[in-house]
Image: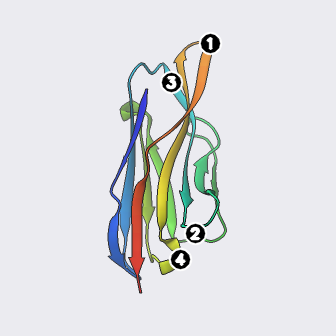
Amino acid sequence: VQLVESGGGLVQAGGSLRLSCAASGSIFSINAMGWYRQAPGKQRELVATFTSRGGSTNYADSVKGRFTISRDNAKHTMYLQMNILKPEDTAVYYCNADIHVSPHNEYNYWGQGTQVTVSS
């Protein structure tokens, strides 16, 4: 199983980006999924998550009202729409998911990350 993020890049403050996370491989189902980020010299932090398959969402206070998480279960893909970006949003963004590879075996996976840089 692989998680591959895409959509990162360089954007000016106030701009928008849309990140994607595509899961591939031997997937029976995907439960919780989420986005995390890690800025230089800082710990990895939660950005936004689905608490279960298509269930309720949870956002970091710093991104509420600006970021929107969504998912397409049929495509095993998750998205993060990021609007009104700020320089402090600069970080490597990681996708995380709890994936059932069979009815009774669930594992947690991380993607390789995608860089988001917001210039002032």
Q: Secondary structure at mark 1?
A: loop
Q: Secondary structure at mark 2?
A: loop
Image quarter where the N terminus lies is top left
Residue 29 is marked as 3
Q: Secondary structure at mark 3?
A: strand
Which residue is at a point 38% across and 23% down the rendered structure image? Answer: 25
Mark closer to the observer (3, 4): 4
Q: CA distance from mark 3 to mark 4?
A: 34 Å
Disc 2: which residue: 63
Q: In the rendered structure, which amino acid carries the disc numbered 4?
A: Glu
Query: Dot 1: within a 10 Å radius of its alpha carbon, few (fewer than 14), some, or many (20 or more) residues?
Result: few
Image coordinates of residue 75 in percent, x first then y, are: 36, 34
Which residue is at a point 37% across and 71% down the rendered structure image? Answer: 16
Disc 4 or 2, which lies upstream in sequence? 2
Residue 104 is marked as 1
Image coordinates of residue 39 in percent, x first then y, are: 54, 66
Disc 3 or 4, which lies upstream in sequence? 3
Image coordinates of residue 82 in percent, x first then y, are: 44, 66
Query: Dot 3: within a 10 Å radius of its alpha carbon, few (fewer than 14), some, or many (20 or more) residues?
Result: some
Disc 4: which residue: 88
